[in-house]
Image (cartoon, rainbow, N blue to C red):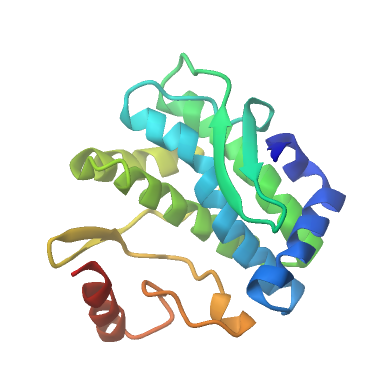
């Protein structure tokens, strides 16, 4: 099914979608479910514009330009933008700022999730989506300028080397472990040694 991203400004719609997330992630406090939901959504939401930026043809991340694809159980399968941007990084950053501030504001109002924590998740989603394009050097070069152009007090994106791989050194925690699930491999709420060991095991 499809949903216009403008629904992220609708508190009732967001509340209903986050409530449904309990079936996927387990029952927990609203702020935990809201954070987990945003961790999943933010990666999809930023993807069209971040990936097109690497290609040199940025698409508009404004809510009225973006459509989100999701399935009935609440998982997000993708997103797309219907509009190109003619300007540079400043225009892209401003458009992203509007989208992220609206979505984060709605989720925070509905669940009482910490807006700064949600902002850190957005930074990590941008970093990951840049890396997933496969152009590591360009991804790293674009990450900090893009996040700076967005503003909103987002933390600066960080990267580290794990063996032969470049990964996002996360500034955020999705709180999945507070819903009775294991911590993510890259979770920042573990010792650096444990994180490195788990990443090496996962990446080979």
Q: If the image is split into quadrants, where does the C terminus sit?
A: bottom left
Horizontal side, residue 129 vs residue 29: left or right: left
Reply above or below: 110 against 56: below
Horizontal side, residue 119 vs residue 193: left or right: right
- State the image quarter where residue 75 is shown: bottom right
The picture places residue 124, in percent across and down from the top left corner, at: 43, 56
Name the residue at the top extreme: 86
Reply above or below: 196 against 191: above
The picture places residue 164, in percent across and down from the top left corner, at: 12, 61
Q: Determine if residue 16 is in view.
A: yes
Q: Residue at x 75, y 51 (%)?
A: 106
Observer-nearest residue: 104 or 56?
Answer: 56
The picture places residue 143, in percent across and down from the top left corner, at: 34, 44
Q: Residue at x 42, y 65 (%)?
A: 171
Q: Residue at x 68, y 47 (%)?
A: 103
Reply above or below: 12 against 190: above
Q: Residue at x 21, y 74 (%)?
A: 200
Horizontal side, residue 64 vs residue 83: left or right: right
Q: Determine if residue 153 is in view.
A: no
- State the image quarter where residue 17 is shown: bottom right
Horizontal side, residue 156 vs residue 163: left or right: right
Q: If the image is split into quadrants, where does the N terminus sit?
A: top right
Observer-nearest residue: 109 or 59?
Answer: 59
């Amino acid at each position: 099914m499809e949903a216009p991203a403008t629904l992220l400004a609708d508190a009732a719609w967001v509340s209903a979608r986050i409530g449904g997330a309990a079936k996927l992630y387990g029952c927990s406090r609203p702020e935990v479910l809201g954070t987990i939901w945003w961790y999943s959504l933010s990666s999809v939401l930023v993807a069209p514009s971040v990936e097109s930026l690497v290609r040199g043809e940025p698409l508009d991340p404004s809510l009225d330009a973006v459509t989100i694809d999701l399935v009935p159980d609440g998982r997000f399968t993708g997103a797309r933008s219907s509009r190109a941007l003619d300007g540079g990084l400043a225009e892209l950053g401003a458009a992203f700022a509007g989208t992220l501030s609206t979505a984060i504001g709605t989720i925070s109002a509905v669940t009482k999730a910490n807006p700064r924590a949600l902002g850190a998740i957005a930074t990590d989603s941008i970093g990951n989506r840049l890396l997933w394009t496969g152009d590591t050097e360009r991804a790293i070069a674009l990450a900090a300028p893009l996040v700076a152009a967005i503003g909103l007090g987002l933390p600066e994106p960080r990267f580290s080397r794990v063996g032969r791989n470049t990964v996002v050194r996360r500034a955020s925690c999705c709180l999945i472990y507070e819903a009775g699930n294991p911590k993510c491999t890259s979770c920042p709420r573990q010792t650096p040694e444990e994180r490195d060991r788990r990443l090496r095991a996962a990446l080979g």
